[in-house]
Amino acid sequence: MSERIIEFRDALREAMSQEMHRDPRVFLLGEEVAQYDGAYKVSRGMLEEFGPRRIIDTPISESGFAGMAIGAAMLGLRPIVEFMSWSFSLVAADPILNNAPKMLYMSGGQFGCPIVIRGNDGAGGQLGSTHSWCVEGMFSNVPGLKMAIPAFPDDAKGMLATAIRDDDPVFFLESERLLAMKGHVPEGDHYVPFGKAVVRRPGTDVTLVSFGRPVHFCLDAAEELAKEGISCEVIDGRTIRPLDIDTIVESVRKTNGCVVVDQSWSFGSPGSEVAAQVHAHCFDDLDNHVMRVHSADVPTPYAANLEQEYLPNARRIAEAVRSSLYVA
Amino acid sequence: MSSVTDPAPPAASGGRPLAERTSATPAQLHEWLRQMLLIREFEVRTMQAYQDKKIGGFCHIYIGQEAVAVGCTAAVQHADPVVTAYRDHGHALARGMDPKYCMAEMFGRIGGCAKGKGGSMHMFDKPNNLFGGHGIVGAQTPLGAGLAFAKKYQDEVIEGGVNKHVTLCFLGDGALNQGGFYEAMNLASLFDIPVIFVVENNGYSMGTSIERGTSMSHRIIAKGEGCGIKGYEIEGMDVITVYEEMKKVADTARAESRPAMVDLRTYRFKGHSMSDPRKYRTRDEEEHWETGDPITRLRDAMIGGGLIDTDGFKALNKAQKVAVREAITWAENSPEPDLSELYTDVYVEKFGPYTGTSMPQIVTDAEESR
């Protein structure tokens, strides 16, 4: 493991910077990415490094600049679009959902769309309902796009570098709550393949499956449950599309139990998809039905205590695990 | 000022000798006449095929607007990108798509330009730099800005030279009222993007006349001027006028690397789509515009200039009828896509049920003929 420890946000920047040095077709555009150094300082210093032709400040105009980037990708450039928040992607729904993931299909294979759209996703900052979107549930429904959601700084770098090199449109979901997280991040080239989940904590009694920030909630819950003698295996799915169902199934066949933890709403979500697939693959292996822990099925609240209760937090995960194991 | 209530005189610019009116060569004029006749015949046969249920879904006919697609594409170079909306058959043919690929696409056959996966509203032609055919009103306008941005980026940032390209982004007057268009214009102006927003102003967004749906309908280029974009009003029923004026607009946009907006006054002789009884406009209005038929105008101008005679015109028209008949036969003989095609072209990379991509015949034929 690398000796070097850096923040999640700097790992993201390293991936972009490295790929921009490698490939002149790669450029970054979005609100405040250049002169302001990024609303969350992810692109800090990149304007000086690459100049205004490749680090491009846009007006607040998500539909326009996302659509523009998609047009540029059709011609072979490889844009990185930063949405300050995925919550703002909703005004760009037509280009990002109707154009980017469908262009290859509708053109019969003639025009692909090698674009990365990245930004903050998820609640937790007391931003209220309009700014707290988890878009996993809504957007993972759409074929033609890939969806990556890193939980650790080394994956932030390795998965973003992979996303930029990918020939398909990648929706890259970052958590503002994780940007200051520090961790070992390899220097130089580092690529994490898509569709390869990773076991973050081995265990024997139940499999916890999650994506992005809630992986940390799972690890917290597993730590608590260990004190009660319950051994959880925690799987970080890393990408929702493609979904590494094989790693999940392998674990569930060992533990005979499964709790899916997903920060999107429960109805029609990655969590419900994983549960359905586990039921199909592991019907005879399960000692209980797959349980799911999601954000509460309400608009995101502002009040700190309500927001904490809203999230798929460690307490709610632990309760689901105990219930799954018929404990309590 | 041409609008649906006050149409332009049909032969407004037809009085002067041909040589004074255009810099185009006789060969160019012949080619435009051929293209317009091809589009006209193609659309007549498309309507028949639609009524015979050989074509499904939505289908929008270009008859009446031929001078716009033909004159505009003639005014740019082949390497310049073109993107348009859903009334796109004319643009595809004017760009050089073989009518057989266009017809087969509407027939839902593997020989279609998009292997039957796009349909009437989604014509794509990589060898001819046509980037669709887009079904959502106005959706192609940010894409058009992006295509022009990419060409400029390739010319200047990657190649280290100066911008050499201009992009044609067609839209209907109905798209003037979509928010994305204003975002696209603002970005194009801010970033000096050489894209021309060509408004094919046929006076109606579906059944809503421009006066009923669009503010400043008497002077829509004001909308571009609000973004600092130069606007041009061009009479769109005469291909020579379209070409001469668009040539200046395109050359300026290319040289200055600046966007432009064009209000091209035209008229669709048929309904919005195949299911439109056209109750929102009068027969008198339609007849008035039909007297300014762009094909008749070019034919008469060429006959007057001694560039073609009646027999020559008939022969040219007959050749297009033959070409379209052949296209229909070819499309009918093209197989339906294999069911395995359902799962291709979803991702470039293969995974899960998705099996990667293969190029359509339109691309492989173009590569072979190179």
Image (cartoon, coloured by chain):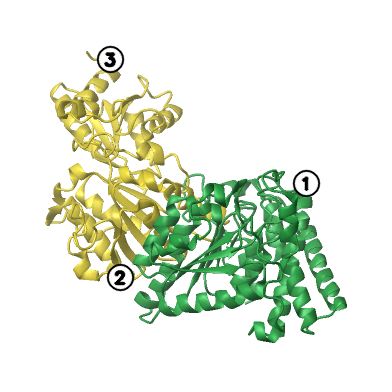
Hue of chain A? yellow
Q: Secondary structure at mark 2?
A: loop
Residue A230, image quadrant: top left
Q: Position of residue A289 (x, y in %)?
A: 37, 21
Q: Chain of mark 1?
A: B
The vertical placement of A146 against B97, above or below, is above
Q: Disc 2 versus disc 1: distance between alpha carbons?
A: 51 Å
- Residue pointed to by mark 2: A53
Chain in green?
B
Q: Disc 3 versus disc 2: distance between alpha carbons?
A: 60 Å
Q: Residues within 10 Å of mark 2 (few under 14, many from 20)?
A: some
Give the residue at x 25% y 34%.
A234
- Residue pointed to by mark 3: A326
Q: Secondary structure at mark 3?
A: loop
Q: Chain of mark 3?
A: A
Residue B51 marker: 1
Give the residue at x 50% y 61%.
B219
- Nearer to me, A52 or B251: B251
Q: Is residue A264 left or right of residue B169?
A: left
**Which image quarter is the C terminus of chain B in?**
bottom right
